[in-house]
Amino acid sequence: MSQAVSGRAWILYAVMAVLWGMPYLFIKEAVDSFSPAGVVAGRTLIGAAVLLPIAWHRGALRPALRVWPWVLAFGAIEMAGPFFLLSHAEQTLPSGLTGLLVATVPLFAAGIALTRGDRAVLSPVRAVGLLLGFAGLVVVVAGPGLAVADPGAALLAIGEVLLTALMYAIAPFIIATKLAGVPALGSITLSLLAVGLAYLPLALLTPQEIPTVRSSVSLVALGLLCTALAFLGFFALIGEVGPARAPLFTYINPIVAIVLGILLLGEELSAGLLIGFPLVILGCWLAATGGRLRPPAPPSGNGASAVS
């Protein structure tokens, strides 16, 4: 594959940076009316409804059904856990901070790769990246200006988002080792459908507020734009630049999340966030790429997930 990035690829990079920078805004609005379980059920079932005909037409479902236990495992780690944890956490945390914490996925991915014997993670540049990212995270969480009503609830929510980042880092290893020969569209569609059906009874049993227009529109946008359309765009981007370079747009996602939170939700840009944000992004980039704009393809699928 040529190292040059085409114009179509740059457009896809920009589209993905926006599509997966917006979920935190939509989740924040959706949980005003819907329970976290309701948000998960709504976005996954909407996404599955859009992708199911496409996956059926492309013949992507049957190969995924043959390995359904691993498809369900992928759905649990990539969607069922993270989608619920994010929805619950955003009842407490600002959307911009949530987006930044999720951007620590490459740090966790580097740690997982290290435990799997990937010695490249031990390079000096990547080691500096891990330290910078961790330092930035400490500044964001413990630094000045984090305004929350309940510090205890905020710490729990931060833990939920970091657990989400860890799960997002684990999921690509399942794809690389257990779902390598399965069409991604089939795996994603079946996972969305299974997660949506699993959460639907819980969503119906948990208390919901009377849905507002903002919350309802946000939930639909979350399912259509940030789930169904975003996955299709991600597949197209992988086809253009390959799996190694496709996730590079994730370093822009937190910027989109923070800007949207400030402009549309009136969230404050705290001093801790202002200082720690560049450290986290720089650290994640160094840890994931070793300081190269065009990282080599990882030998065992050590890429980072960008889903939120």
Image (cartoon, rainbow, N blue to C red):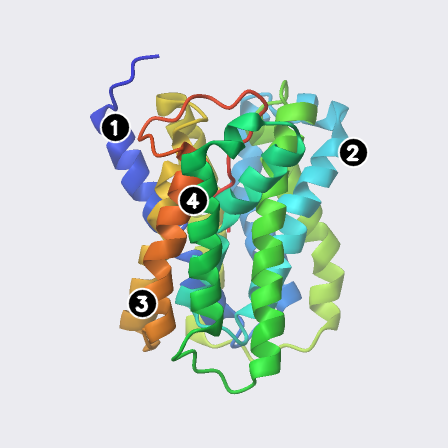
Q: Quadrant of residue 23?
A: bottom left
For the view shown, which residue lies furthest in the left direction?
7
Question: For the residue labelled by badge 1, is the local secondary structure a helix, a strand or a loop?
Answer: helix
- Image quadrant where one finds the N terminus: top left
Question: For the residue labelled by badge 3, is the local secondary structure a helix, a strand or a loop?
Answer: helix
Mark 4 = which residue? 129
**Pointers 4 and 1 in contact (C-beta within 8 Å):** no
Identify which residue, 86 or 136, lies in the foreground. 136
* Cα–Cα span, label 1 and label 2: 36 Å
Q: Residues within 10 Å of mark 2 (few under 14, many from 20)?
A: few
Mark 2 = which residue? 69
Q: Nearer the viewer, mark 3 or mark 1?
A: 3
Taking 5 as reference, is 134 left or right? right
**Pointers 3 and 4 in contact (C-beta within 8 Å):** no
Q: Hey, what amino acid is under mark 1?
A: Arg
Please report the residue visible at 61 percent of the width from the left and 49 percent of the height from the top: 166
* Cα–Cα span, label 3 and label 1: 33 Å
Q: Hey, what amino acid is under mark 3?
A: Leu
Q: Is 12 placed above or below 82 here?
A: above
**Residue 50, x across and y down, in percent:** 51, 42
- Nearer-N-terminus badge (3/4): 4
Mark 3 = which residue? 274
**Residue 179, x across and y down, in percent:** 66, 25
Q: Quadrant of residue 43?
A: bottom right
- Nearer-N-terminus badge (1/2): 1
Q: Hey, what amino acid is under mark 4?
A: Gly
- Nearer-N-terminus badge (2/4): 2
- Nearer-N-terminus badge (4/1): 1
Q: Nearer the viewer, mark 4 or mark 1?
A: 4
Q: Nearer the viewer, mark 3 or mark 4?
A: 4
Mark 1 = which residue? 8
